[in-house]
Image (spheres, rainbow, N blue to C red):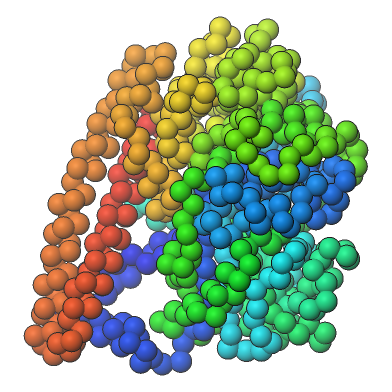
């Protein structure tokens, strides 16, 4: 019998290959019609955020009157001033939020992550990591009491990886997970995992950090009148549908925040609070009634075995309104203008101390186009563009911040340019040994997923303001060069393509002309190499339609064969043709597109 391969999302949007024969079509059709054996009762809803909404020494849960004790990285509404209430985030217009879906304006945050480098004299420079994505995964399982309900209005909570009950459950038997993943020759992930927060010294294709928050609620506190933790508890066995401790008579969806650092560069990293434990904050901003509707109506994928922690993502796409105006991250210059004036992107001393520093009073009640005057396009890393001073990317040269040109492209007085050299810029340090590792780590913190290898040398030599490998073009966001959020327009690089079929891949299609990315590259040889990579990419993409159409036709033939052999009923033939084959065709397109991007990425890396 003809065998075909379909791709199924697995483990936080990870992809694995599963053989499917015509005989197994029957089983899937029976499951789809409701005839199934005892299986998984968990619903998993996946919300993929392509970028942060910003960074600030703010914690609207802990203290709404003064600065937080350390810097946090936020996802969701750009409303993350300490003086932020439930109504503020719930009513945030979608265009001022990095949320993928309009109905969810919840705010998630965690300690910011910094790469630490030493200039050789003992002076450390802290460069914030900006090339981040996150996926809040919501899980619920109604097969066991107590009842699962939506987060009530005003609900908030904080969870630490060393909280009581927080060390069990999850996909590895431990609630906390760190994974260092690389891609093999076939583009498949090969991961090393730890059951704790861990920053490996080696490089990774991406570093993932995941932790689930507790699900058992005491029905009394919203988390605004206590330590923001004691109103919640983990299940006694760590499982999503596990028993709740006494006194916790309601269950809310489990929120697992999965944070990804693309193109992780290795070396020394630390959290903004200096801790070895991870923590996550959640401030509910769901449209009232919507999450409960999802809990009541979304059905589990029972094709997975009972207890499977990672069934396919479901529920969101078909029941929520896609945010078509996803906001980028607020520039650091705007944070300094609107929240607290201090360097938090690249610095030789991390700001710290609860209520230390002069908090700027909140100047808005509702975000408008004039409130925040500088943001990076969706999917584009904000990139330590301003060095120590704080001006982000071409849009942000406000308030005459020192050492910054009006475009934010160049550091004055011969300092290293903002873009990728951010980590050295904080103390005027130049990249040591032009080793590209510093460049890569700064690209990690500064311009996202770029691996520029030896290209980093160019930035040290271009004191007159030349753009490095096109990275600085990302700093020229004001000129409209950043085109799609997956890769800043000046970035000809590789690492921006997420190979897993993530949303950036789709956004990347919007780029009109590949050559626009390399028009500012100083080396004609590099430019020629880049153009060759883009030409090969175009050729690769041109073959996708024919390949996947052939795949689709083969699938249809298999359906007819299965019907002729009596393996599926006549009335099930249309389901096979119109649903399974169409799904496989789309999967074919997605995987082929990702493959083309991987090849382009590797080609550009060699350039």
> Where 85 falls versus 267 (above or below)?
below
The residue located at (66%, 42%) in the rendering is: 367
Q: Relative to residue 8, is residue 298 drawn left or right?
A: right
**x and y percentages locating residue 175 in the rendered image:** 67, 68
Please indicate whether residue 335 sits to the left or right of residue 541 in the image: right
**Where the C terminus falls, by quadrant?**
top left
Residue in the foreground of this view, choosing between 136 and 415: 136
Query: In the rendered image, which quarter is residue 408 located in?
Result: top right
Q: How far from the left and from the top, in percent, is residue 38?
A: 46, 92
Q: Residue at x 47, y 74 (%)?
A: 311
Identity of the residue drawn at 65% across and 54% down: 91
Front residue (pair 229, 205): 229
Q: Position of residue 186 (x, y in %)?
A: 34, 53
- Tell me where residue 314 appears, x and y as whole percent: 46, 70
Query: Which of the 4 image quadrants contains residue 518?
Result: top left
Residue 122 appears in view: yes
Can residue 309 be seen from the camera position used here?
no
Along the horizontal axis of the image, is 430 left or right of 5? Answer: right
In the foreground, 518 or 299: 299
* Quarter of the figure that contains the N terminus: bottom left
Q: How many marks?
A: 0
Q: Residue at x 33, y 65 (%)?
A: 7
* Displayed quadrant of residue 115: top right
Q: Is residue 487 above or below residue 16?
A: above
């Amino acid at each position: 019998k003809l065998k075909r391969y379909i791709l199924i999302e697995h483990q936080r949007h990870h992809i694995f290959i599963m053989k499917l024969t015509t005989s197994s079509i029957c089983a899937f059709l029976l499951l789809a019609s409701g005839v199934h054996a005892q299986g998984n009762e968990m619903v998993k809803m996946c919300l993929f955020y392509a970028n942060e909404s910003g960074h600030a020494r703010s914690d609207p849960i802990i203290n709404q009157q003064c600065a937080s004790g350390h810097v946090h990285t936020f996802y969701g509404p750009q409303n993350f001033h300490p003086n932020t209430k439930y109504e503020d985030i719930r009513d945030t217009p979608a265009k001022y939020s990095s949320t993928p879906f309009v109905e969810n304006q919840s705010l998630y945050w965690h300690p910011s992550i910094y790469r630490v480098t030493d200039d050789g004299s003992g002076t450390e420079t802290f460069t914030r990591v900006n090339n981040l994505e996150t996926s809040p995964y919501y899980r619920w399982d109604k097969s066991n009491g107590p009842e699962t309900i939506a987060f009530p209005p005003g609900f908030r909570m904080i969870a630490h990886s060393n909280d009581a009950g927080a060390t069990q459950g999850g996909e590895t038997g431990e609630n906390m997970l760190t994974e260092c993943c690389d891609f093999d020759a076939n583009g498949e992930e090969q991961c090393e995992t730890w059951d704790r927060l861990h920053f490996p010294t080696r490089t990774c294709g991406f570093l993932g950090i995941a932790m689930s928050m507790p699900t058992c609620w005491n029905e009394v506190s919203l988390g605004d009148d206590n330590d923001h933790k004691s109103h919640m508890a983990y299940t006694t066995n760590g499982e999503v549908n596990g028993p709740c401790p006494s006194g916790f008579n309601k269950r809310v969806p489990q929120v697992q925040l999965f944070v990804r650092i693309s193109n992780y560069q290795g070396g020394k990293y630390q959290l903004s609070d200096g801790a070895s434990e991870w923590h996550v904050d959640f401030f509910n901003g769901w449209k009232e009634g919507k999450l409960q509707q999802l809990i009541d109506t979304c059905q589990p994928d029972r094709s997975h075995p009972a207890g499977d922690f990672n069934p396919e993502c479901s529920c969101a796409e078909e029941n929520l309104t896609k945010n078509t105006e996803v906001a980028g991250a607020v520039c650091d210059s705007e944070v300094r203008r609107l929240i607290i004036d201090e360097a938090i992107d690249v610095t030789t001393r991390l700001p710290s101390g609860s209520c230390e520093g002069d908090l700027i009073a909140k100047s808005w009640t509702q975000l408008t186009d004039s409130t925040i005057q500088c943001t990076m396009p969706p999917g584009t890393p904000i990139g330590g563009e301003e060095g120590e001073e704080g001006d982000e990317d071409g849009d942000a040269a406000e308030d005459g911040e020192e050492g910054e040109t009006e475009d934010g492209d160049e550091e004055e007085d011969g300092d290293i340019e903002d873009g990728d050299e951010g980590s050295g810029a904080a103390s005027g340090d130049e990249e040591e040994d032009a080793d590209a590792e510093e460049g890569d780590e700064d690209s990690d913190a500064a311009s996202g997923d770029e691996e520029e290898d030896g290209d980093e040398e160019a930035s040290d030599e271009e004191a007159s303001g030349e753009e490095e490998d096109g990275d600085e073009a990302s700093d020229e966001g004001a000129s409209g060069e950043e085109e799609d959020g997956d890769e800043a327009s000046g970035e000809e690089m590789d690492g921006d393509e997420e190979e897993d079929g993530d949303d950036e891949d789709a956004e990347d299609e919007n780029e009109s002309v590949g050559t626009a990315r390399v028009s500012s590259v100083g080396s004609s040889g590099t430019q020629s190499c880049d153009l060759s990579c883009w030409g090969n990419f175009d050729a690769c993409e041109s073959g996708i339609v024919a390949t996947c159409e052939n795949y689709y036709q083969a699938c249809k033939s298999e359906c007819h064969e299965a019907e002729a052999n009596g393996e599926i009923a006549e009335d099930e033939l249309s389901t096979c043709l119109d649903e399974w084959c169409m799904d496989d065709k789309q999967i074919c397109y997605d995987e082929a597109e990702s493959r083309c991007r991987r090849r382009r990425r590797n080609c550009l890396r060699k350039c």
